[in-house]
Amino acid sequence: MAWIPLPDPRHPHLKSIMSNVPGLRSTYAKVGRLVYFGRMLDKIRLHAAGRLPADFVPNMARGFDGRCCNFLCVKHAELAARVLQGGSDDEILAWCHEQGGQRTTEECEIWNNFMMKRGWRDGGTETLQTRIKESKLEGKPIETFFDLIEFDEGRDPVATKAWFS
Amino acid sequence: MPAVPGLRSPYAKVGRLVYFGRMLDKIRLHAAGRLPVEYQANLGDDKPYVFGSRCCRFLGVRYADLKARTLQGGADLDVLVWCEARGILHTDDECQTWNRFMMKIGWRDERSAALQDRIREYGLAGKPIETGFDLIDYDEGRDPVAAQAWLECPPAGDPGYRTPPGNFPSARLR
């Protein structure tokens, strides 16, 4: 389902959620030690190929994309340019570390858990509940924004305990 | 374990950080001979997954140095400023991420099974405990769920503290 753009600038990623998009992987999927990074690369590639749904486009580089780029200390525009030069996900992650500096395993652990748990007991909780209703996903065991994206795109992260993968 | 006088909640903030104040309390109480023996085994930074160790690593200071500085005296914020000057000065975003990480440890992660074991060991089955912080608070007679202790609020008692300006890169981050 397409999302109606939201006015809340604190959560710009939310308005880009819609039904399953071919080639767009799960938020929980890891590249190297990081969740979400691969999904961000998918969005860049799909956009360049004209296959990223329009609802996603205004939010690229914002929301979770922005958090990921901040963590890696790279600019989204520069990352996008590097992605479109080609190369594997792992190669692009290595490039990010060259540009922005290495991250320790503990830093990755902290960031991954922050991302995976976002929406549960934090400043995004109320907004998450609103988005669940808007997406007509009430009744699903959604506790986080990652869960919301997954369920909205037809995956069930709770049944698979995707946070342990 | 009943409440320990002078030992604050892990949710309590000093400056931008949760847990830090509790760590200082433990240092001071131990030095004063008033920290219960059950708490003493996890003092220090040699056990990587205990909260005090995580806090020291995040700040980029050694526990022994922090202990010595704390016992020299000064307010909590003085000690935090000392840590930030000596160790790593983090961005607001990094502090927020770390706080959330700490507050949510035990929920949907590799500590979840151990948390359930501890709940039973402590005789707290039936309490709405979801995290390690919850466990500590319930064990010491506080109810963090009723208070929604995880919600952001200004740290009490430190009006003089100022968040370092701008969204600067921390010392370690380039």
Image (tube, coloured by chain):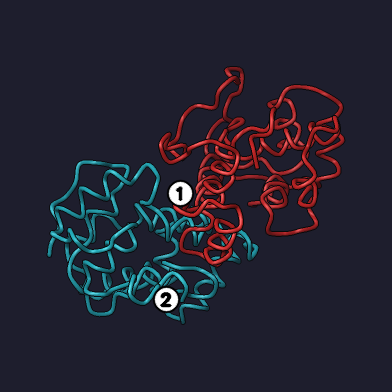
Chain colours: A cyan, B red
Label 1 resides on the chain identified as B
Q: Nearer the viewer, residue B158 or B147?
A: B147
Q: Nearer the viewer, residue B38 or B11?
A: B38
Q: Residues within 10 Å of mark 1 (few under 14, many from 20)?
A: few
> Horizontally, is A155 left or right of B30 in the view?
left
Res. B103 in view: yes
Please report the residue visible at 47 percent of the width from the left and 37 percent of the height from the top. Answer: B149
Q: Residues within 10 Å of mark 2 (few under 14, many from 20)?
A: few
Please report the residue visible at 59 percent of the width from the left and 66 percent of the height from the top. Answer: A97
Res. B21 in view: no
Reading the image, the residue beneath label 1 is B127
Reading the image, the residue beneath label 2 is A85
The quadrant in which residue B87 appears is top right
Vertical relation: B44 (above or below) A107 = above
Vertical relation: A106 (above or below) B18 = below
Q: Where residue B82 appears, x then y in whole percent?
A: 76, 32
Amino acid type at image mark 2: Gln
Mark sitting on residue A34: none
CA distance separating discs 1 and 2: 54 Å
Please identify the residue farthest to the front as the structure is shown.
B123
Q: Could you tell me which secondary element the residue under label 2 belongs to?
A: helix
Amino acid type at image mark 1: Lys
Q: Nearer the viewer, residue B117 or B32?
A: B117
> Horizontally, is B67 left or right of A7 in the view?
right
> Horizontally, is B169 left or right of A141 in the view?
right
